[in-house]
Image (cartoon, helix red, strand yellow):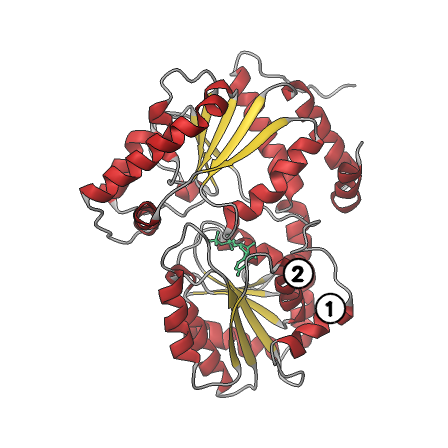
Amino acid sequence: MNDLLVSYAEVAGHDVVDHLCQLAHPLRGLKIVHVNSTREGGGVAEILRKLVPFMEALDLDVRWEVLKGNTEFFQCTKGFHNALQGFAVGISQGMLDTYESVNASNAEELRPVLEDADFVFIHDPQPAALINFFPKRRGKWVWRCHIDCSRPYRPVWRYLKKWIASYDASIFSLAAFARYLPHPQYLIAPSIDPLSEKNIDLPESEIEAVFDEFGLKRELPLVVQVSRFDRFKDPLGVIEAYREARKMTPLQLVLAGGSADDDPEGKAVLEEVRRAASDDEDIHVLELPPDSHRTINALQRASDIVLQKSIKEGFGLTVSEAMWKGKPVIGGDTGGIRLQVIDHFTGFKVKTPEGAALRIRYLLHNEHKRYEMGTRARRLVRENFLLTRHLREYLALIVGVVHGLEDRIELIEQG
Ligand code: UDP
């Protein structure tokens, strides 16, 4: 076992890593490729950054390719994202033409890699049309959807389905997100990496340092939301919840976020958030560079409560990140947050700013509850949302899709 595998075994258990080695063994020599649309920013990049080296550590032949797009392309794909999550977004024919031509030019660049691959994971809608340009593909192609598309805006879904239907299979994070498609669908929840800078234990001094670095008050309880500045993350609702809670309980709020290369709306949302926060010195809106993993880790650890008040959420890695740090999470009652926040047990699910304010006040007045829920939250993540479980499911899926049902291995209990 190499050093990386030993480190994972120490956190997740030796049996877990042994199991991964067994699953990976028959897949050695297969060429596996992941394609998404940004190397930095957002949950997909966060996962691939760690999943790909982990697969390499298991001696798998894996590559991560990133689609190259222009502003109009990313405006179009952000429109897809918003539409899949339920907004009625009109996308012009000109934009769709850009979408298809960007996919066509990327297909030419990636042709040698993708035509030769045994297994291709295409993440989200941005590169979904690539498949159209590989009529001679020899491998299996799987579309991996990270978005809550439980109630997509129909015209946009109909357009995307044209491409997605050609895949050999698709993966969704939750059963509620699955769509009618003419191929097998798999459910795989995302995960966090316990060994990443974002999630490793930090010395107390580094956690304390965020108070000085960002001008936070040591004497005030700290509530934090970490998210791209995106309307689905409801940063304005978070500010409303803070103002409501603050009428009865002193506290301070950090909204920390950055941008993602494939998200052109971030700047405008950040401006709205800054305007909404400008009259209150205890609301800290932090725009962080993309490599601020340790800073985010320290902010999450320094907090008393973590919020993720999304109104739509594919999964919400930030929720598991906070829970791994033993924090109770107040999360929007939606999508993947429902897998992680178990009401009254690992945190609270809320629908409104008022609901969030009520739970903030309750938790700030109950240190023991914060500790109890935080402890359960960490255990839930350890058992369900670490990278090791995620990779096991990907490997099992590859075995299943490549070999089909005939070669299924039956495990029979001995004795
Ligand atoms: N993140 C980050 N910097 C930021 C904002 C977010 O590194 O300024 C990270 C965050 O810690 C998490 C990921 O980006 O790991 C966001 O994933 P999530 O599933 O929560 O949301 P998405 O952005 O994919 O909608």
Q: Is residue 6 above or below residue 410?
A: below
The kind of residue on which mark 1 rests is Glu
The residue wearing badge 1 is: 206
Using the rendered view, name the quadrant where residue 318 is placed: bottom right
- Looking at the image, which is closer to me, 113 or 394? 113
Q: Is residue 371 left or right of residue 79?
A: right
Horizontal and vertical percent position of residue 381: 64, 51
Q: Which element is circle 1 on?
A: helix
In percent of the image, x 61 and y 57: which residue is there? 321
Q: Residue at x 66, y 77 (%)?
A: 211
Disc 2 and disc 1 in contact, CB within 8 angstroms = yes
Does any portion of residue 129 appear in the rendered image? no
Q: Which one is nearer the viewer's eye here, 366 or 112?
A: 112
Q: In the image, residue 322 lies at what x, y percent?
A: 61, 61
Residue matched to label 2: 294
What SS does tag 2 mark? helix
Question: Which residue is pictured at 47% across the width and 45% down the height?
Answer: 38
